[in-house]
Structure formats: C-alpha cells, structure tokens
Amino acid sequence: MPSPLPERFTIPTNGIHTGGRITADDLPALHAAGIRHVIDLTPDAEKAGFDEAGAVRAAGMAYDNLPIAGAGDLDREAVVAFDRLLQAAEGPTLVHCASGNRVGALAALRAAWLQGAGEEAAVEEGRRWGLRGLEGEVRARLARERCLADARGSDGAPRCDTGG
C-alpha cells in the first residue's frame, strides 16, 4: 500500500510505515502524515551529523533506536526487542534503517519466530516491509532454526550450521 510520505516509504500493515533513512527535512511531512513514533534501526555510526532522536522528539514524535548494523545483529534478541517496540508504539509509526532492508529482515524473522509463519510467508512479509539484500541471511537463519527444531525431536541430531 502506498504511503502518504515520500515514495521511499510504504505501509506494510495498518499504522506502520517503513523505509529508508530520514533527514531533518522529512520531519514536517512525517508529522503532517500523522506519524507519532519513529523506530530507527540505524547505529550511531550511520547518523553522520544528524541528531535524529533530538530532532524527532522536537517535532513532537516519540523516538526509539534499536541499532542493527547488519546481518550479524539479526538474532532472536533483536527480533524480540523489535516486536516489543512495535507492540508499545502508540499511533502511526515509521520504522526505518538506511534503505528499509534491515526493517524487512526483522519483520520476516518476527513473522517466523514470534508469529509462527512458515518460511515463504515470513519472507513475503519481510518483502512487504522492505526486505531485499538480506533475504539470503533471513532464509539461512530460518533454515538453522528448522534444523535445530528437528534435532530436538530426533535421536540422532542432524548437523546444523549454527554459526552466525
């Protein structure tokens, strides 16, 4: 579904907008579009010279930061934290990283690990939220989880690559 925000944003589900990096120039449009909460997945190193937290709050919106630097941060702890932030958000929310890819990766893993979606449904959900280049990483994590779950139910544990 298209978003009333600039074209780099979309609405994967009611009340949630997703997309890439925001700037100070975006804040009036975000507020005018009814955004009340911003969840930023970028680490401080990606915010060169922009105090996003301060600017968002000064514009009258709530702000949370869950720094996801890349694939190495896509773990259960991050997915649970992401879910908690979404559950606690009051009003229309923008979730963003630099391009939307990390947003989509967390959404896909959330769909699978916390909401019980199968792999294909979870990946499709992630795509709606912005998943692109991290799809292989998401699929690898889902495959490892599946392998580990299968191992728990068998006498002979299959070999799982549990690294990463």
Image: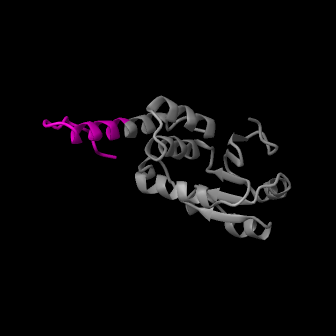
For residue 90: magenta?
A: no
Image: magenta residue range? 143-164
For residue 154: magenta?
A: yes
Task: Relative to 45, say whether 129 is above or below.
Answer: above
Location of residue 37 (image quadrant): bottom right
Task: Relative to 66, say whether 111 is above or below.
Answer: above
Location of residue 64 (image quadrant): bottom right
Question: Looking at the image, which is closer to me, 151 or 126?
Answer: 151
- Please state if 21 lies on the left or on the right of 68 as rendered: right
Residue under the image location 50 percent in, 46 percent down = 110
Q: Position of residue 96 (x, y in %)?
A: 64, 50
Residue under the image location 27 percent in, 41 percent down = 148
Q: Position of residue 140 (x, y in %)?
A: 38, 36
Question: Looking at the image, which is closer to me, 30 or 98?
Answer: 30
- Please state if 145 lies on the left or on the right of 87 as rendered: left
Residue under the image location 54 percent in, 44 percent down = 107
Task: Point out the image quarter for the N terminus.
Answer: top right
Location of residue 139 (image quadrant): top left
Residue under the image location 49 percent in, 35 percent down = 135
Q: Position of residue 60 (x, y in %)?
A: 79, 67
Q: Position of residue 67 (x, y in %)?
A: 53, 59
Taking the view exactly as shown, the residue that stands out farthest to the top is 120
What colour scheme was applied to this rendering of the protein? one colour
Number of numbered labels in the structure image: 0
